[in-house]
Image: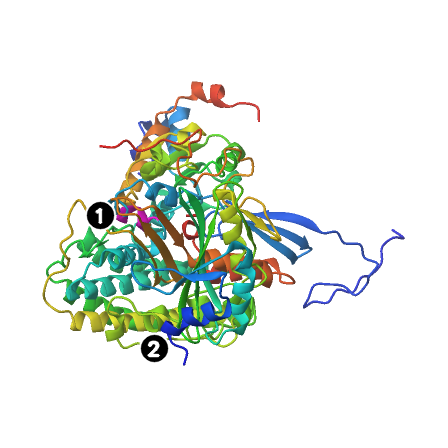
């Protein structure tokens, strides 16, 4: 009982100024199975009490060797496999691959096909951001956005099921255009969904954006500075939240994006709140692009004729596409046969998780969960 | 001033002898660099050139059977220019210098290159296995003609 | 007449209420099948369909199935997605950490037999049943939420057919 003494602990930082109080660092393993690591990512944390001293990501738990598989598949057989690269934006993955092959083989996509690609990718972007909203709220402890977000995503998924027959991995964008035309009445249903959805985004903002608890947990938490974001080649909403106005749809346009009119929302500080609000604003812009695509949809063919024995000439090409997470890249090398020599895929989440150890030191473990959720990374993009 | 077509001529002027232009299909700005000069070229591209290449998008390895290639794709967010940089390496004992301190994004890409292709990256801060299991002992899987224990090749129809 | 109508029971009225005669294993099986708590073990694409099945439109909660994060608190492991060689020891560890009775449902083509990654992949385990014993296989890539619910309902039927005599045989010292 003589050893007891009163230690003054600062209620805000949780540390004590008494340097004689012995503490020990310990290692905690977060993952690979963890409800909030968004897939199988293992973070090895060195902790001092509640504070994270160092974070070391270990990846590779979902390394399925897609690149090795693609070296032994014909060009048309690769499109369904590309969906599995980033399953929440599978339209964009298919587009990324087909864009590269079309550039090497000089295949001209008809205008209706281009418009349909934009329409489907933007609907997919809204669906992906809804999943972000759902899981971000769930990780912070708010269960309502999860149920609301997935309820509204079901309407988009119904539209996709009508068009391509699948709910998640569509295999809709093919070399030369898209797989099939829109079903009867699709335009009306889509516009009805957009009219229903725009006020619902305001409901989501009511739930979270100005909530004092949410603001305390996300404002000035996990700040990724401009220089660090560019150094680590961050992309998408993470880069835009750090203040850099860079969007591939406007700065390196592909398809027919140069015919559409939309804003690029950016943040100021690069903290977790900025990454969240950029995605909410992007959902509104995507709704506007969908409306423009439907109203401006031209008549004509939706797919160029591509022979079953498709053999592009020898060459190589690196294409980039703006997905919900950022810049996806594909480097395709062709040697004149009907199978690619090399297909290298690059996902935005790879670079974001690479940058995670730089912003970790000194934060609390609950903040780490919020930061990781705000990066919105998925593991197949990291591990391929 | 800083347009896409001036990129390759300005680099050839700065590094004559170690850098040569590549003709690729479809046409794009591409240069071939000697393995020994790669760090100098990237320091120039990052800091000294007017095109301000600040974004390393991708770093990949390619196994063209007679040689190995390392391909870098860099971009500029200010001038919107692009460049492809290639390095050719011999298939036995390939080695390259790391560019982690110039572009931090190269870190994990170089680790992946070394474990999947067997290219030794010099002066890298952290060379552990990234994607493969920790007890992997079956060689470098992305090389052409590699086989392993659990590897089933798809039969030709 | 909730419970009574769902089980084969013999009921008679006695002063003060009713007397229900049934077999112990039926009551235990029925209660176990009506509250299967599944572990959140999302590996890949099928995890999104598992999330959708637990969410607003296709509700898992009406079957009594709630997600639990910890293996110690769950009865059912839904293996959703591709299993790789790096992940295999961890899934074995998680399976061992679950307490009996435990069930495994392999969801999707990848968990069943390697799926689209069977050929030409050096790091994919060709089926989760090479590592842990599986009770139900749900095919699809990814399977629809209705398929997953059908798989869970088949699992509930399987649980209801378990015999009391077999339980002591399954329990091994941990």
Q: Residues within 10 Å of mark 2 (few under 14, many from 20)?
A: few
Q: Quadrant of residue B86?
A: bottom left
Q: Is A49 or C13 nearer to us in this picture? A: A49
Q: Is C173 or C86 nearer to us in this picture? A: C86
Residue C23: mark in rendering? none
Residues beneath discs 2 and 1 located on the same chain: yes
Question: Where residue A193 sits: x, y (%)?
Answer: 23, 66
Under circle 2, the secondary element is loop
Q: In this orientation, does residue A167 appear?
A: yes
Q: Callout 1: residue from which chain?
A: A
The correct choice, above or below, for A282 with respect to A64 in the image is below
Earlier residue among tags 2 and 1: 2
Rendered residue at 62%/53% (across/down): B125
Magenta stretch, main secondary structure class: helix
The correct choice, above or below, for A285 with respect to A95 in the image is below
Question: Where residue A55 sits: x, y (%)?
Answer: 61, 54
Q: Which residue is mark 2?
A: A263
Rendered residue at 46%/22% (across/down): C167
Q: How many marks?
A: 2
Stretch in magenta: A79-84
Q: Which residue is mark 1?
A: A311
Q: Callout 2: residue from which chain?
A: A
Q: Residues within 10 Å of mark 1 (few under 14, many from 20)?
A: some
Q: CA distance from mark 2 to mark 1?
A: 39 Å
Q: In this orientation, does residue A141 appear?
A: no
In the rendered image, the residue lying farthest to the front is B17
Rendered residue at 75%/64% (across/down): A9
Q: Quadrant of residue A208?
A: bottom left
Question: Where residue A43 sits: x, y (%)?
Answer: 56, 50
């Amino acid at each position: 009982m003589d050893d007891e003494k009163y230690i003054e602990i600062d209620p805000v930082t949780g540390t004590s100024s008494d340097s004689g109080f012995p503490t020990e660092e310990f290692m905690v393993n977060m993952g690979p199975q963890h409800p909030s690591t968004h897939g199988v990512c293992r973070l090895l944390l060195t902790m001092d009490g509640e504070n994270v001293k160092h974070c070391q990501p270990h990846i590779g738990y979902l390394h399925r060797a897609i690149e090795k598989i693609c070296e032994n598949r014909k060009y048309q057989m690769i499109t369904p496999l590309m969906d599995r690269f980033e399953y929440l934006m599978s339209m964009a993955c298919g587009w990324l691959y087909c864009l590269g092959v079309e550039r090497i083989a000089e295949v001209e996509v008809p205008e209706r096909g281009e418009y349909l690609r934009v329409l489907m990718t933007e609907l997919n972007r809204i669906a992906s951001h809804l999943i972000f909203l759902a899981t971000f709220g769930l990780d912070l402890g708010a269960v309502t956005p999860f149920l609301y977000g997935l309820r509204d995503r079901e309407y988009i998924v119904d539209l996709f099921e009508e068009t391509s027959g699948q709910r998640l991995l569509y295999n809709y964008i093919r070399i030369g255009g898209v797989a099939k035309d829109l079903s009867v009445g699709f335009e009306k249903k889509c516009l009805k969904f957009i009219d229903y959805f725009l006020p619902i985004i305001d409901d989501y903002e009511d739930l979270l954006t100005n909530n004092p608890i949410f603001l305390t947990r996300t404002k000035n938490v996990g700040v990724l500075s401009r220089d660090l974001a560019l150094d680590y080649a961050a992309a998408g909403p993470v880069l835009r939240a750090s203040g850099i106005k860079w969007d591939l749809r406007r700065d390196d346009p592909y398809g027919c994006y140069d015919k559409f009119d939309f804003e690029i929302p950016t943040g100021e500080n690069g903290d977790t709140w900025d990454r969240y609000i950029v995605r909410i604003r992007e959902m509104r812009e995507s709704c506007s692009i969908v409306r423009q695509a439907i109203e401006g949809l031209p008549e004509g063919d939706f797919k160029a004729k591509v022979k079953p024995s498709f053999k592009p000439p020898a060459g190589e090409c690196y294409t980039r596409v703006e997905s919900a997470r950022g810049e996806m890249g594909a480097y395709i090398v062709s040697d004149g046969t009907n199978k690619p020599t090399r297909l290298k895929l690059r996902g935005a989440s790879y670079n974001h998780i690479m940058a995670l150890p730089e912003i970790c030191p000194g934060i609390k473990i609950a903040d780490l969960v919020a930061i990781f959720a705000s990066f919105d990374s998925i593991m197949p993009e990291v591990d391929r | 001033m800083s347009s896409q077509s001036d990129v390759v001529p300005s680099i050839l002027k700065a590094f004559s002898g170690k850098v040569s232009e590549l003709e690729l299909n479809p046409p794009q700005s591409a240069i071939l660099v000697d393995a020994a000069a790669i760090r100098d070229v990237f320091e120039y591209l990052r800091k000294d050139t007017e095109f301000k290449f600040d974004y390393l998008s991708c770093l990949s390895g390619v196994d063209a059977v007679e040689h190995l290639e390392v391909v870098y794709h860099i971009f500029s967010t200010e001038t919107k220019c692009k460049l492809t940089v290639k390095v050719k390496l011999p298939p036995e004992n390939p080695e390259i210098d790391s560019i982690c301190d110039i572009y931090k994004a190269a870190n994990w890409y170089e680790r992946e290159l070394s474990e999947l292709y067997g290219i030794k990256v010099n002066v890298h801060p952290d060379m552990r296995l990234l994607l493969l299991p920790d007890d992997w002992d079956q060689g470098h899987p992305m090389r052409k003609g590699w086989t392993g224990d659990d590897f089933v090749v798809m039969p030709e129809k | 007449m909730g419970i009574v109508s769902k089980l084969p029971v013999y009921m008679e009225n006695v002063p003060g209420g009713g007397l229900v005669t049934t077999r112990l294993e039926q009551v235990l099986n029925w209660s176990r099948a009506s509250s299967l708590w599944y572990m959140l073990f999302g590996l890949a694409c099928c995890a999104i369909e598992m999330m959708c099945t637990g969410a607003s439109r296709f509700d898992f909660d009406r079957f009594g199935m709630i997600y639990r994060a910890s293996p110690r608190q769950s009865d059912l492991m839904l293996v959703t997605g591709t299993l790789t060689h790096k992940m295999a020891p961890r899934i074995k560890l998680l399976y061992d950490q679950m307490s009996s009775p435990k069930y495994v449902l392999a969801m999707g083509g990848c968990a069943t037999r390697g799926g689209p990654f069977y050929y030409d992949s050096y790091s994919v385990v060709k089926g989760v049943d090479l590592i842990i014993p599986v009770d139900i296989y749900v095919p699809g890539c990814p399977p629809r939420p209705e398929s997953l619910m059908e798989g869970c309902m088949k699992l509930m039927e399987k649980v209801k057919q378990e015999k009391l005599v077999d339980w002591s045989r399954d329990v091994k010292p941990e």
